[in-house]
Structures are given as C-alpha cells and as structure tokens.
C-alpha cells in the first residue's frame, strides 16, 4: 500500500468588532443636569447631556453608541467597527453641570487594544492508493 498525505491550510482572520466602556460614577440625588463625555488623549468622541430626565446628544462621532439604563443609572459608550488604529486610552467623564459648582461624578480611563489574530487550522487528508496486481481484486495490496 502506498500512502500520501496532503496538508490543507485554512486561515481565519479574527477581529474584535466592538468594545463597551462603562462609565463608573457616583450618582447623586441632587443632579438636575449632567454630562457624559468620551474622549481619547487627543480627541473628544462623544458628548451627551441629561436635562429633564432625558439624555440628548451634544455631539457624537461615528461609530460610537451611547447607552443609559435608567433603572440602574448605568452609562456606557460602545465603540463600533473597531480598527487597529483605534487602539488607545479612552476616558469617560461624568460631570454634574447644574446646581453649581460643576462636580466630576466619575472619571473612568480604559485602555483598548485592538489586534488581529491569525489562526491556522490544519486538516490532514490521507489519500490511499491501492495497487492491484493484474487487476484482480484478490491480489490487491491494501
């Protein structure tokens, strides 16, 4: 029996598509109006403000999504469609702006690292050649 082994390589490109940045802050009962701002070291990405119990967009660059859960008062910014160049330090600042003076309720810094992981999955295919003498099945070599 002659046996040959062929290798088949399969490459998968894995990307982290989004990252959620939770803004940890100390909610207070005397907050009539506040802001939540997401920024990098060089650039302000998204800003929302709370007025009359409703969050409104001040500005927000694509692709950033703001989420607020009223029951828990959780604030989250989600970075969508991440690319390698989005790697960096992000800061979320929540600030009380009405009922002077302005007060930082929380500042959260998060390091986001976007990477490409290349995985190689190897599949082995065994090809077996059967040689028969004089085409007689009884004399085949398996």
Image (tube, rainbow, N blue to C red):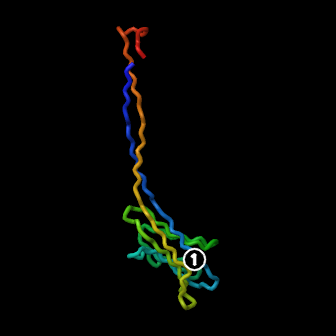
Q: Which of the 4 quarters of the picture holds residue 126?
A: top left
| Residue positioned 39% across, 45% down in the render | 11
Q: Position of residue 142 (x, y in %)?
A: 43, 17
Quarter of the figure with residue 135:
top left
The residue furthest bottom is 100
39 in relation to 13, above or below:
below
Residue 109: image location, x then y, percent: 49, 73
Q: Is residue 100 left or right of residue 136?
A: right
Quadrant assignment for the N terminus? top left
Q: Position of residue 141 (x, y in %)?
A: 41, 14
| Number of disc labels | 1
Front one among 73 and 127: 127
Please, is residue 116 above or below residue 140 in the view? Answer: below
* Residue lying furthest left: 134
Name the element at disc 1: loop
Which residue is denoted by mark 1 in the rendering? 25
**Image point (43%, 67%), residue name:** 63
**Callout 1: 10 Å neighbours few (<14), some, many (20+)?**
some
Q: Residue at x 47, y 61 (%)?
A: 18
Q: Is residue 107 above or below residue 80?
A: below
Q: Nearer the viewer, residue 96 or 53?
A: 96
Q: Position of residue 42 (x, y in %)?
A: 38, 76
Q: Quadrant of residue 136?
A: top left
């Amino acid at each position: 029996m002659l046996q040959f082994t062929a290798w088949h390589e399969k490459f998968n490109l894995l990307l982290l598509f989004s990252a959620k940045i939770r803004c940890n802050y100390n909610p207070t009962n005397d907050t009539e109006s506040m802001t939540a701002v997401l920024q990098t070291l060089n650039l302000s990405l998204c800003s929302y403000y709370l007025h009359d119990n409703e969050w409104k967009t001040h500005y927000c660059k694509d692709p950033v999504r703001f989420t607020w859960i009223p029951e828990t008062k959780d604030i989250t910014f989600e970075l969508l469609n991440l690319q390698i160049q989005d790697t960096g330090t992000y800061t979320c600042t929540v600030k009380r702006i009405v009922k002077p003076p302005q007060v930082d309720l929380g500042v959260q810094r998060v390091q986001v690292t976007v990477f490409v992981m290349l995985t190689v999955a190897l599949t082995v295919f065994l090809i077996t050649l059967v040689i028969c003498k004089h085409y007689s099945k009884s004399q085949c070599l398996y």
